[in-house]
Image: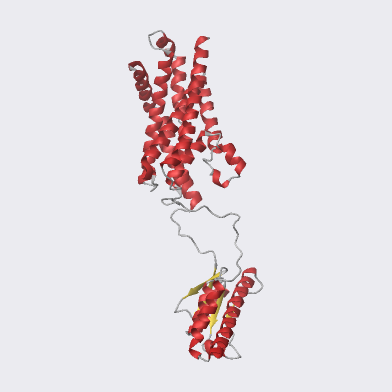
Amino acid sequence: MKRILDITFKDLIELTRNRMTFLFLLIMPIAFTLLFGLAFSGVGKAPEDPRLPVGFINHDNSAISQELTNLLKGSTVFRLVEDPKTTPADLQQQVADKDLAAAILIPAGYSDAALSEAPIQLTVILDTSTVSGTAIQGDILAATNRLMDAIRTAQIVSEVSGDPSVFGSALSETLAAWQNPPIRVADTSAAPAEAQPGSSSNAFSHTSPAMMLQFAIAGLLTAAQVLVSERKSRCLQRILTTATSRAQILLGHYLGIVILLLAQFLLLILFGQLILKLDYLRQAGATLLVALTAALCIGAFGLLIGVLSKSEEQAIMFSLIPMFILSALGGAWVPLEITGTTFSTIGHLSPVAWALDGFENIIARGLGFGSALVPAASLAGYAVLFFLLAVWRFRRSEER
């Protein structure tokens, strides 16, 4: 055990002295997490109302005009912009300047006229030659027609009952009935999954673990170079002449890589928890399990790269090319949730996909400890596979 720890300690000293180690394992993951998170998610921006702005003045201020106002506010095409200081001339100028898509003015006496046989028309300022103007006009007509139909229905109810006082309640009930029609068409083809308690919409919930894993693979470059330089300087051959076995040499190098990766994960998890406000520690045990198995998997892959590489150029190639392939395939750049089923299935051939599933189940989907077990088991399986391949390749290379 002492020989294994000696090799581990030696590797850690060499790796921590190399500035490239901190560049790949800490600086670049943080930089790219912030870059992609801020660029693609609109962090810090309040959600904007996509509806067209329409100026609005109500000179009637009656119960009926208020009902019309409520109907107009329910439009999916436009939103009402009300300012007590705005005059009709101001609205006309704002529409002309394109500051408003249209303007609506409810004239005084609108309520009394609506109850008679000659209702007063609304004053509407818009350009019907445009698509937006036509859409706004259609929604205004729909709202006014709905109100007039409800008024006629309420009048009939009050006349039949012989009690004029029921008009107000009949009008409200009629308008409310529009919100609950007897027949409703619902699109259930793409119903969203119900959010779990503790789920998060934090913009960094994907980019933080994605960049952490991507640059963990890139950071294997420095770990692989340790093995390459050890072989080139014939230090490895000298070690083999001692009582140190091949298994102890591999385990010592492997343990050094795993400790370095685990330290990287823990530091970036703390950065995500404290700075990015991601709740990694909501299920601390699950987060640690995923981080540990991811470190074991990537560490075994780094050991394999070091064994396969015969030169520093090969170490660079064998580290960076898999980083791009495994990261892209595993959803580090584009979440697999928004890709097709086929691509998502293929993407899970990459251990990056399983590690992302584990982290995102905790910080984004709000799931419990059990959600980390399958990703962790998959990562552990990859770790065993890569380690056995490294052992096999190391034995063959030393026998030659």
Residue farthest along the top direction in this orientation? 241
- Quadrant (top left/top right/bottom left/bottom right) for the N terminus: top left
Colouring mode (rainbow / by chain / secondary structure / one colour): secondary structure
62 versus 50 height, above or below:
below
Residue 16 in the figure: left or right of residue 55: left
Image position, residue 121 (x, y; %): 59, 85
Image position, residue 303 (x, y; %): 47, 23
Q: Decide which of 282, 230 is in the foreground and name it.
A: 282
Residue farthest along the right direction in this orientation? 129
Q: Decide which of 167, 245 is in the foreground and name it.
A: 167
30 versus 252 height, above or below:
below
Image position, residue 64 (x, y; %): 51, 83
Q: Decide which of 229, 372 is in the foreground and name it.
A: 372
Q: Is residue 88 in view?
A: no
Q: How many marks?
A: 0
Residue farthest along the front direction in this orientation? 161
116 versus 47 height, above or below:
below
Residue at horizontal 53 percent and vertical 26 percent from the top: 318
Q: Is residue 26 in view?
A: yes
Where on the picture, by quarter, is residue 175?
Answer: bottom right
Image position, residue 186 (x, y; %): 59, 62
